[in-house]
């Protein structure tokens, strides 16, 4: 029976020759992830079940990134509980402030996820790692507690939807625009509990950073996971980086898909998702005059080196509008250092941006960029729900880094060609 890449990975981890959509399986996990919001709950459940210890101290990753550096007493207590658990169980992949980064930027960078892996995390954007040809998905803290104890989880095998992109990308168009266009077409529940498989000549030419962005937002269409079949681009990224053996899986040519969508990438412009859902996307040329108070560039969606390069290219030699706050969040310390070495940070700061240590910060309305009543923000983050970044009467618009940078300069939502 032919299978998709998602089905093949799940079959391998369930010890089966084949699986089919709708089938319930028990599967071994390659990595279990928790952060400073979700891991404390998982730790409490872990202790309740009386587990003697973790299943593998090298296959658990704990990354305090949402409210760190700690913003208040409660967040400090949460981080403390993770720190103590990591010490007690000698967790190898615990990342403290100063070495940590935004989890979904950090784990691939550290070589903790590879093609063919099965990864679960107590964070919905764990689906990011599908960019490497892995099956990765978010789960609740109780499931994470059980997986930390026994190294297994249960899953219902999802149906797959294929998205085929052909043609050359226009200038200033990247992975963020492709995924926003898709979500705009199918809606925030258009891939509910399904695998979103991104393929085609356009994807084959897309950078790893662009692929991470696309898979990161699969959850915004309700998907169980997003995935890109691994290729030479993948291999170049993981060589010398991946810490475990890996497997390149590919979908069979005659594999069954619930739906197949085809796109001519040459016709896709930079996109902007209007409040209050990622599905409210439209071309930036159709945005009209929307004044902004804040621009945020970073997060697990667009906080990688390619994103900072694009932002610096737009901003270099220019100034942020006097009515706008521009906040930059590199995804990891390594990305921060690379941006320093390339002169990107200087260009951003001289333009008037505030550059932060890696943290999820404003993306979830955590800290370091909260919006007041009536304020508008354009952001390279992944969600623009009501109150997502602060006051329930504020507004968040989602875009790629080039649009966010150009908007910061002009004080309104704008295309990067307007400031060239």
Image: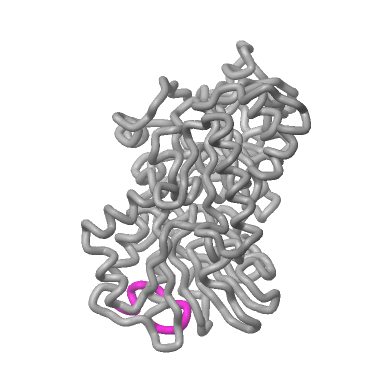
Q: Quadrant of the C terminus?
A: bottom left
Task: Relative to 246, say whether 214 is above or below.
Answer: below
Figure label count: 0
The rendered magenta stretch, by its main secondary structure, is classed as loop
Q: Position of residue 276 (x, y in %)?
A: 66, 68
**In this view of the protein, which residue sits in the foreground, 407 or 252?**
407
Magenta residues, as a range? Answer: 410-420
At a point 73% along the width and 33% down the height, the residue shown is 47
**Residue furthest bottom in the image:** 322
Q: Position of residue 40 (x, y in %)?
A: 66, 44
Task: Relative to 56, say whether 184 is above or below.
Answer: below
Q: Position of residue 50 (x, y in %)?
A: 75, 26
At a point 42% along the width and 75% down the height, the residue shown is 326
At a point 52% along the width and 43% down the height, the residue shown is 128
**In this view of the protein, which residue sits in the foreground, 194 or 49?**
49
**Colour setting:** one colour
Q: Position of residue 170 (x, y in %)?
A: 35, 59
> Taking the image as drawn, is residue 388 in sight?
yes
From the viewer's perspective, is 67 left or right of 359?
right
Q: Quadrant of the N terminus?
A: top right
At a point 55% along the width and 70% down the height, the residue shown is 397
From the viewer's perspective, is 194 left or right of 327?
right
**In this view of the protein, which residue sits in the foreground, 62 or 397?**
62
Task: Relative to 259, say whether 386 is above or below.
Answer: below
> Taking the image as drawn, is residue 177 in sight?
no
* Residue 135 forms part of the magenta stretch: no
């Amino acid at each position: 029976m032919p299978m998709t890449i998602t089905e093949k990975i799940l079959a391998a981890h369930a010890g089966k020759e084949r699986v089919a959509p709708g089938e319930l399986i028990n599967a071994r996990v390659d990595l279990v992830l928790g952060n400073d919001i979700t891991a404390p709950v998982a730790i409490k459940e872990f202790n309740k079940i009386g587990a003697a210890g973790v299943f593998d101290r090298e296959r658990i990753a704990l990354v305090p990134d949402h409210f760190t550096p700690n913003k208040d007493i409660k967040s400090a207590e949460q981080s403390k509980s993770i720190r103590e658990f990591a010490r007690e169980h000698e967790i190898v992949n615990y990342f403290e402030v100063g070495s940590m980064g935004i989890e979904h930027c950090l784990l691939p960078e550290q070589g903790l996820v590879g093609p063919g892996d099965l990864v679960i995390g107590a964070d919905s954007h764990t689906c990011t790692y599908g960019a490497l040809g892995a099956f990765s998905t978010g789960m609740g803290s109780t499931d994470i507690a059980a997986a930390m104890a026994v190294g297994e989880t249960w899953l219902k095998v999802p149906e797959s939807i294929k998205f085929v992109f052909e043609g050359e990308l226009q200038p200033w168009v990247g992975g963020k625009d492709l995924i926003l266009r898709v979500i705009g077409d199918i809606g925030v529940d258009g891939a509910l509990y399904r695998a979103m498989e991104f393929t085609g000549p356009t994807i084959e030419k897309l950078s790893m950073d662009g692929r991470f962005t696309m898979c990161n937002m699969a959850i915004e269409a309700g998907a169980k996971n997003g995935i890109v079949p691994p290729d030479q681009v993948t291999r170049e990224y993981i060589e010398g980086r991946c810490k475990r053996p890996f497997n390149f899986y590919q979908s069979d040519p005659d594999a069954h898909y619930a739906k197949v969508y085809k796109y001519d990438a040459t016709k896709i412009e930079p996109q902007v998702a209007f409040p209050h859902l990622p599905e409210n996307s439209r071309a930036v040329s159709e945005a009209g005059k929307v004044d902004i108070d804040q621009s945020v560039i970073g997060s697990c969606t667009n906080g990688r080196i390619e994103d900072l390069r694009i932002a610096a290219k737009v901003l270099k030699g220019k100034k942020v509008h006097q009515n706008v706050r521009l906040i930059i969040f590199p995804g990891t310390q390594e990305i921060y250092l690379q941006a320093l070495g390339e002169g990107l940070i200087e260009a951003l700061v001289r333009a008037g941006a505030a550059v932060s240590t890696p943290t999820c910060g404003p993306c979830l309305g955590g800290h370091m960029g909260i919006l007041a009543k009536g304020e508008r923000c354009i952001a390279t983050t992944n969600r623009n729900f009501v109150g997502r970044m602060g006051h329930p009467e504020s507004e968040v618009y989602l875009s790629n880094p080039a649009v966010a940078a150009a908007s910061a300069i002009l004080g309104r939502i704008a295309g990067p060609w307007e400031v060239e």
